[in-house]
């Protein structure tokens, strides 16, 4: 899809291979908590359904899913989590959007600002880079379970923009307004999703040199290692030399 960088693809694969299970569980549970604030019944809460599907895809235990839902609805303590997005810049003038879920926004903003500064970046004002990105829905599916034709028949009919081959998986891309309709059409067709979420896709990308690419990768890794950071979006594309090293 337009604006979906090679870096995004590498980052996605790298995240699957390298992410610590505990970190993945924490992110998934927080998304369930936030989603459940709008209602604890997944039948009537599409975001909660998607969050539960994503949690099951990484084998988050059933009791942790149930507890996260109860935290979100207020049945259990621990649901005071806010979701926010910080905007800023990385090395080479690359635009960054850092999405967080936190129970202490003062702590989180200080930590994000420190990470950015330490790695040659800086925090910006709200709205400084968001205009460079489009909000899209992205649904990921196992490559060996479905053919491209099967997915396109269901997804495009429901309003998806594209179905792309991401190496180890299929990716269905939708406009934000069509995300739920496409996800529900795939569900109705019996398609199992690895993940279903909104993301920020850059309208244009900056191709950086190898040195800047390494700095940016270290910055993104440091941000993603923070317990409150849910997602990092950036508008850079890595040079082929660096992509080859990453495999």
Image (cartoon, helix red, strand yellow):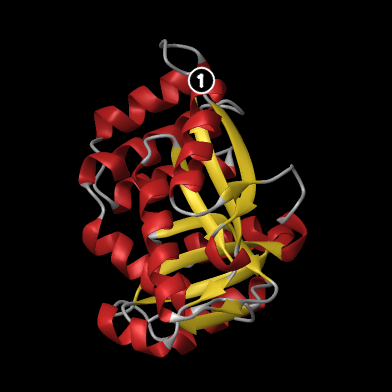
Q: Nearer the viewer, residue 247 or 180?
A: 247
Q: Nearer the viewer, residue 168 or 230?
A: 230
Provide residue 171's location: percent of width, then percent of height. Answer: 47, 74
| Quarter of the C terminus within the rendering | bottom left
Q: Residue at x 54, y 83 (%)?
A: 152
Q: Is residue 191 visible?
A: no
**Residue 177 occupies quadrant:** bottom right
Task: Report which residue position mark 1 lands on.
Answer: 104
Provide residue 217's location: percent of width, then percent of height. Answer: 39, 64
Provide residue 77's location: percent of width, then percent of height. Answer: 42, 10
Please indicate whether residue 228 sits to the left or right of residue 57 in the image: right
Q: How many marks?
A: 1
- Secondary structure of the residue carrying numbered label 1: loop
Q: Residue at x 43, y 33 (%)?
A: 30
Q: Residue at x 74, y 43 (%)?
A: 126
Please indicate whether residue 31 sits to the left or right of residue 159 in the image: left
Q: Is residue 130 visible?
A: yes
| Quarter of the N terminus within the rendering | bottom right
Q: Nearer the viewer, residue 23 or 61?
A: 23
In the figure, 90 relative to 39: above or below? Answer: below
In the figure, 55 relative to 243: above or below? Answer: above
Q: Nearer the viewer, residue 1 or 111?
A: 111
In the figure, 94 relative to 68: above or below? Answer: below
Q: Residue at x 39, y 86 (%)?
A: 147
Provide residue 173's location: percent of width, then percent of height. Answer: 58, 71
Q: Residues within 10 Å of mark 1 (few under 14, many from 20)?
A: few
Please indicate whether residue 19 sits to the left or right of residue 89 in the image: left
């Amino acid at each position: 899809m337009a604006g979906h960088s090679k870096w995004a693809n590498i980052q996605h694969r790298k995240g699957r291979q390298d992410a610590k299970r505990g970190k993945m569980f924490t992110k998934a549970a927080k998304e369930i908590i936030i989603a459940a604030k709008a209602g604890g019944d997944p039948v009537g809460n599409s975001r909660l359904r998607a969050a539960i599907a994503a949690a099951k895809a990484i084998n988050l235990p059933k009791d942790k899913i149930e507890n996260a839902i109860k935290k979100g609805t207020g049945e259990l303590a621990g649901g005071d989590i806010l979701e926010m997005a910080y905007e800023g810049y990385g090395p080479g003038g690359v635009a960054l959007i850092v999405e967080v879920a936190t129970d202490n926004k003062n702590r989180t903003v200080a930590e994000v600002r420190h990470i950015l500064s330490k790695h040659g970046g800086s925090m910006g004002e709200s709205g400084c880079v968001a205009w460079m990105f489009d909000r899209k829905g992205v649904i990921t599916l196992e490559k060996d379970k479905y053919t491209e034709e099967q997915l396109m028949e269901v997804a495009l009919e429901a309003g998806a923009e594209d179905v792309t081959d991401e190496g180890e998986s299929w990716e269905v891309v939708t406009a934000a307004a069509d995300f739920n309709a496409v996800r529900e059409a795939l569900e109705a067709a019996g398609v199992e999703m690895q993940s279903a979420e909104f993301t920020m896709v850059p309208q244009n990308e900056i191709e950086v040199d190898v040195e800047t690419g390494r700095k940016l990768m270290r910055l993104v890794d440091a941000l993603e290692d923070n317990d409150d950071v849910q997602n990092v979006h950036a508008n850079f594309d890595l040079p082929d030399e660096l992509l080859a090293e990453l495999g």
